[in-house]
């Protein structure tokens, strides 16, 4: 699933929570989205609807008219596509594009399990080939 213009809009933290619901469900009415988010947040249904409208305006979500006043929302940006773009942007912005500095910083401050270290070694060895 790719955004038609290959452009990934800036998505706020709140909008990202709405996107997570859509990625999980694939598509949903605003009522389902609201029902899913209300127990997890302090937002009112109008706030969630506003975020949905912003996501539509940004081209991250499509909205198709359903029965009555209902709309069906679908993500236009894939979850993996978004995560890759957001991660790349973060590394570029905070670590001047250096993946080494990002990983080294985390390894020095967070304890990795033996299994995680083994898994990372395997990935790095595969990249050398």
Image (cartoon, rainbow, N blue to C red):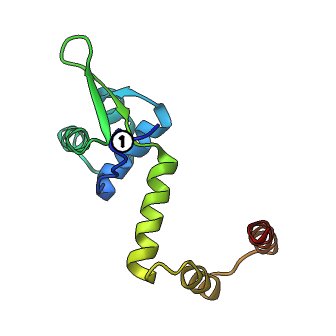
Residue at far top of view? 67
* Depth order, front residue of 101/126: 126
Secondary structure type for disc 1: helix
- Describe residue 4's horizontal placement relative to residue 26 as left or right: left
Check disc 1 and report the residue beneath it. Answer: 37
Q: Position of residue 46 (x, y in %)?
A: 17, 39
Q: Position of residue 60 (x, y in %)?
A: 32, 42
**Residue drawn at point x = 46 percent, y = 67 percent:** 88
Q: Is 83 rendered above or below residue 97?
A: above
Q: Quadrant of residue 44?
A: top left
- Describe residue 55's horizontal placement relative to residue 98 as left or right: left
* Depth order, front residue of 128/101: 128
Q: Quadrant of residue 21?
A: top left
Q: Position of residue 56 (x, y in %)?
A: 24, 38
**Residue drawn at point x = 41 percent, y = 80 percent:** 94
Q: Is 120 rendered above or below residue 11?
A: below
Q: Residues within 10 Å of mark 1 (few under 14, many from 20)?
A: some
């Amino acid at each position: 699933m790719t955004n038609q213009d290959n452009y990934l809009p800036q998505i706020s933290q709140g909008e990202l929570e709405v996107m997570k619901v859509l990625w999980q469900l694939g598509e949903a009415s605003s009522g389902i989205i609201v029902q899913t988010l209300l127990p997890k947040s302090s937002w009112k249904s109008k706030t969630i609807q506003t975020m949905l409208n912003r996501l539509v305006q940004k081209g991250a979500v499509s909205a198709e008219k359903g029965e009555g006043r209902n709309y069906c929302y679908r993500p236009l940006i894939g979850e993996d596509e978004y995560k890759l773009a957001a991660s790349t942007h973060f590394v570029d912005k905070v670590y001047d594009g250096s993946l080494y500095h990002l990983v080294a910083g985390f390894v020095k401050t967070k304890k990795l399990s033996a299994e995680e270290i083994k898994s990372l070694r395997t990935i790095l060895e595969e990249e050398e080939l």
